[in-house]
Image (spheres, grey):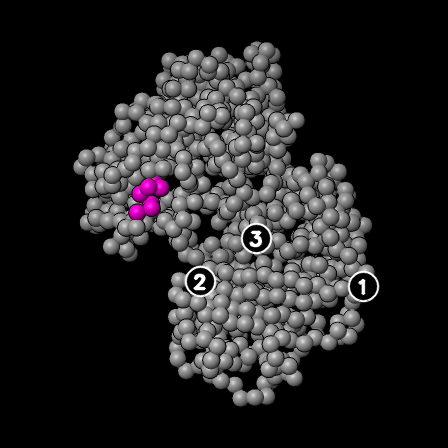
Amino acid sequence: MNVIPLNRPRRKLGTVSVPNVTLAHGGGGKAMKDLIDDVFISVFGGGGPDALEDQARIDLLDLTKLGDRVAFTTDSFVVDPLFFPGGDIGKLAICGTINDLAVGGAKPLYISCAAIIEEGVPIDLLRKIARSMAETAQVAGVRIVTGDTKVVHKGACDKVFLTTTGIGVIGDGISLGVDQASAGDLILVNGLLGDHGAAILGARGDMALDSPIVSDCAALHGLIAKLLEAAPRTRAIRDATRGGIATVLNEIADASSVSISVNEELTPIRPEVKGFCEILGLDPLYLANEGKLVAVVPQNEADAALQALRSDPLGHDAEVIGEVTAGEPGRVTMRTVFGGVRIVDMLVGEQLPRIC
Amino acid sequence: MKYVDEFRDRDKAKSLVREIESLVREIDIAKERPIAIMEVCGGHTHSIFRYGLEGMLPKEIELVHGPGCPVCVLPMGRIDDCVAVAERSDVICTTFGDAMRVPGSRKSLLHAKADGADIRMVYSPMDALALARKNPDREVVFFGIGFETTMPSTALTILQAEAEGITNFSVFCNHITIVPTIKAILDDPDMQIDGFLGPGHVSMVIGTNPYDFVAHYYKRPMVVAGFEPLDVLQSIWMVLKQIKDGHAGIENQYTRIVPEGGNERALDAVYKVYELREFFEWRGLGSIDHSGVKIRESYAQYDAERKFAMPNIQVADPHACQCGSVLKGLIKPWQCQVFGTACTPETPLGALMVSSEGACAAYYQYGGVKKQAAAS
């Protein structure tokens, strides 16, 4: 991946001298401009020829050199706490948007960022989030090219909400889809599952568990490019975010009208996450991930796919966890470590800890 | 995970299943009808589904999922009362997570929260007491539910509140006791249970002696069982062995946790803080004498029922709901007329569809084969 250097701004940027955001920063006047300059433009760049316009302008010809379809996605981030082991809301937003593009086979290019800010939030906290976004984007080789800020009354939102929208280009001939799984295909994951969900629950600190678990938050486009190179007939890729791999597997089984059977013994989950789930009565299959993908790969490309995944640090613990079968359409089952078989259904509502 | 994986060993499971199969072949009643074994506790129901144990057992064994899910047996009226208290502006209502979704006649706690009530999920009553310390100008009410398993922790929290002189903490006590309920099931003329898996966590507190009547008066074997899949299989084997030998006794498979005499300190706290209610309403089972506890007069200041004017709402179970028949083992969850149609985990009609320990929700979530059979 080439790293695109951020443009340094040409005009003099405004700065904020007060410690906290007030409603004045959303008023549209100088205070707002200073906030945007100080917090966002200073780290995102934005000194290009269209810097003063209301929209980023993207050269179509440049896009068509990369492929034949534009991929376009949007996602909002409301994570609590804003900073957690392994990441923060800024890193999460950029990685999440990159991954939503990349799992469709797209090369992620441009991202927009809208921030809804609660009055009273420290400016330094915003600076930290924006820096994290800029760094994540720079390492990933994508550019944050446009954005928006709104400030709302105390209590109208929880500190900071971010919405990021991404544009990427899908290369000629790449055609991934959750409706393309067929009997005999294998199910791969790129590593240990449930880390993000467990890290967030642990970081909230309301269950007095001292948890060493770190979020897996990562941009997966590089890994996916390697995977598609090694296994060009890959049927489908999904990132297993909210609802965990159980949800993704159900979506694939539904869309493709196939059965999926996974093997608990082969499903990689770190002991700390298992222990965390045991204590709280949660099922790690439903815990969120932010750097894990599920790939459906034809059997004859599975070895190559697994090797490609494992050759990358983000896929070091990759495993083949199951297979697509011709069983009842939409059914996902798991062979348990104990030798029994159970249904893995879609989760109803939120996972609630069991009483005892 | 050490101390966990040992109890999930596949090879040991296989040999246990083989022994169960050969034992079943020697039991005469199995030639005429399935042997019905009730697991009393919802934790066992959860393990059975989580590890796919039903599918591993010979078809001559029928597992009946009993009333031991405290969330499931909460009647609608008690939820309505809790919602009424939670909706007061001076109250922070605290509850265990899986009680949030139990339907009341108006709404669940989850819906009340969405409508603006200050309801917080806690993992222990001590967390609720900590909230009371932090919010001296609000009344923190803990929705105390559960069998003898959770009863001591609520009692100890009340004793702690007293020791600290905290006055803005109270408990809406819905704790229930399992023994009268097992008796009620055994007294039911339709009862068809050949043996029981006794509750593990409850017995950790009360010991195994309180179950003696099951063997002596009703001549049914009971094995107090642990919750790991090998525990459950071994306990089933132990029940079958008694049936085969024509014996009925109370055995303890869960010796690593359950002492015969229970936990004296926990029981002390329980007796100090609670007394038996004359009767308590169970969802699906109706009113059962001496099956619930209330907070004693001497701790009245920690009793939400005394502190607030509870509406004390009585609500009949929905007509179509057959939770009672499922709880008594008379029908299987999928044989209920509303299973998977009017009653689903998204919109539970009966409480057995609410908690993952509830037999219906467990079937719906994990037991799809039977679900499909029901649909067709």
Q: Amino acid at mark 3?
A: Arg
Residue under label 2: A157
Q: Chain of mark 3?
A: A
Lower position in the chain sequence, tag 1 or tag 3 = 1
Residue drawn at 33 percent across, 45 percent down: B86
Residues rendered magenta in the picture: B82-88
**From mark 2 to mark 3, how far is it between C-alphas?**
21 Å
Which residue was labeled with disc 3?
A242
Up/down of B295 relative to B215, above or below:
below
* Quadrant of residue B150 within the rendered picture: top left
Residues marked 1 and 3, same chain? yes
In three-dimensional space, the C-alpha distance between marks 1 and 2, rounded to whole angstroms, equals 42 Å
Viewed as shown, does residue A292 lie left or right of A123? right
Give x and y (percent) for residue B197. 46, 25
Lateral position of residue A156 relative to residue B314, left or right = right
Q: Which residue is mark 1?
A: A172
Residue A157 image point, x, y percent = 44, 62
Q: Is residue A169 above or below residue A286?
A: below
Residue located at (55% from left, 25% from top): B337
2 or 3: tag closer to the N-terminus: 2
Counting other residues with Cα less than 10 Å from the Cα at mark 1, is it few (<14), some (14-19), or many (20 or more)?
Answer: few
Q: In this rendering, would B131 be left or right of A288?
A: left
Callout 1, which amino acid? Answer: Asp
Q: Residue at x 61, y 79 (%)?
A: A53
Of the two numbered discs 1 and 2 in the rendering, the one whose residue sits closer to the viewer: 2
Q: Residues within 10 Å of mark 3 (few under 14, many from 20)?
A: some
| Mark toward the start of the polypeptide (1 vs 2) | 2
